[in-house]
Amino acid sequence: MTEDNIKSTEDLKRILEKTAQESGLYIKGEVVALKTDEQREAEKEIKEWENRDPEKIINTSQTEIYKDFLNMTLKGNINSLICISKAGYGKTYTTINFLKEMGINFVYKSGYVTPLSFFNFLYHNRDKIIVLDDINEDVFKDKKMISLLKSCLYEAGGDRLVSYESTSKDLLVPEKFRFTGKIIILANEFSNKNKETFKALVSRGIYFDLKYGFKEILGISKKILKSQNLKKDVEEKVLEIIEKNVCEISEFNFRQLEQLVEMVKYDLKKAESLFLHSFEQDEDLIFVSKLIKMDIPVREQAIKFMQETGFSTRKYYRLKAIIKKSR
């Protein structure tokens, strides 16, 4: 077979694959099968979400840095960006809306994936911007998964070649292909981030830790409330509940803020009780936090803690150290 014939065959194959995908089909060898109704419906919902107009982002020093990193990744020679943060800090919201604001077309994938299903996914999106969001952490402990991602992001001889040798009937695509896209990974903390395999993946792109201090979270929360044009009594009640119940050691985030707003809208009087029942906290730490803010000597704070809780002053100082560390 001549080189021209080979190119013509590859071109024809790409056209057939594209036609099949647009028709709701998937291909395995020469066999074409219909996607399930559930697959089609899920893909439709994701596509509608991707196509919505961008929503307003509350700019902070952190989001400004993150936007620069996104720009560097998408417009330069960097092929990946890993953004981690605690749950509820808005990394998905910020990322998706920045991409929309920049007019970037992307594909989005979330949830559990196996290396084989991921390889199929990569092939069908080999020239696209891929956002991997909240992928199960076990995936990043899997050597095959790490190997696939590394192949997508590292050029060997000018090409990024991704391969997967398997006799499984679930391998629906060629065993080797050229990847020209870029990958954005969004995740919570990685427990294996100090392992060499994970470090090797991170070294192929930009690694950004989206984090906020307590005062920053409160400041951003106030800006979010202002941007929502809430009724005055609703906004004031939300702020009152936060002031009364949230402190430095509270695991408070923007997702919980959204839930609190809905609770206040639902019932102004019941909102605080509903919030406390949905918001797990350490009461002793909360009490120590309040004592620290009192205008009395530290020794008196410790004695007051002992009298009110029955615990020793030693525990007071231990909890105080935890609060100081969290600031």
Image (cartoon, helix red, strand yellow):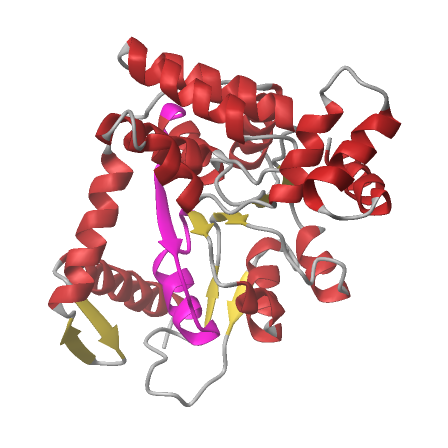
Image spot of residue 72 (x, y percent): 59, 31
Relative to 70, say whether 169 is above or below.
below
Does 114 lie within the magenta span?
yes
- In which quadrant of the rendered view does residue 283 lie? top right
On the rendered image, what quadrant is the N terminus found in?
bottom left
Relative to 104, say whether 116 is above or below.
below
Does 10 lie within the magenta span?
no
**Residue sitting at x 35%, y 73%:** 173
**Residue sitting at x 38%, y 54%:** 109
Q: In the figure, is residue 195 to the left or right of 138? A: right
On the rendered image, what quadrant is the C terminus found in?
top right
**Residue sitting at x 28%, y 61%:** 14
Does the rendering let one see residue 57?
no
Q: Nearer the viewer, residue 235 or 1?
A: 235
Q: Nearer the viewer, residue 47 or 327?
A: 327
Image spot of residue 172 (x, y percent): 32, 76
Image spot of residue 10 (x, y percent): 32, 65
Image spot of residue 155 (x, y percent): 63, 55
The outermost residue toward the bottom is 167
- In which quadrant of the rendered view does residue 192 lie? bottom right
Does the rendering let one see residue 308?
yes
Q: Nearer the viewer, residue 308 or 236?
A: 308
Q: In the figure, is residue 290 to the left or right of 139? A: right
**Residue sitting at x 47%, y 16%:** 222
Where does the magenta region start and end? 101-129
Q: In the figure, is residue 299 to the left or right of 178? A: right
Q: Nearer the viewer, residue 37 or 317?
A: 317
- In which quadrant of the rendered view does residue 96 lie? top left
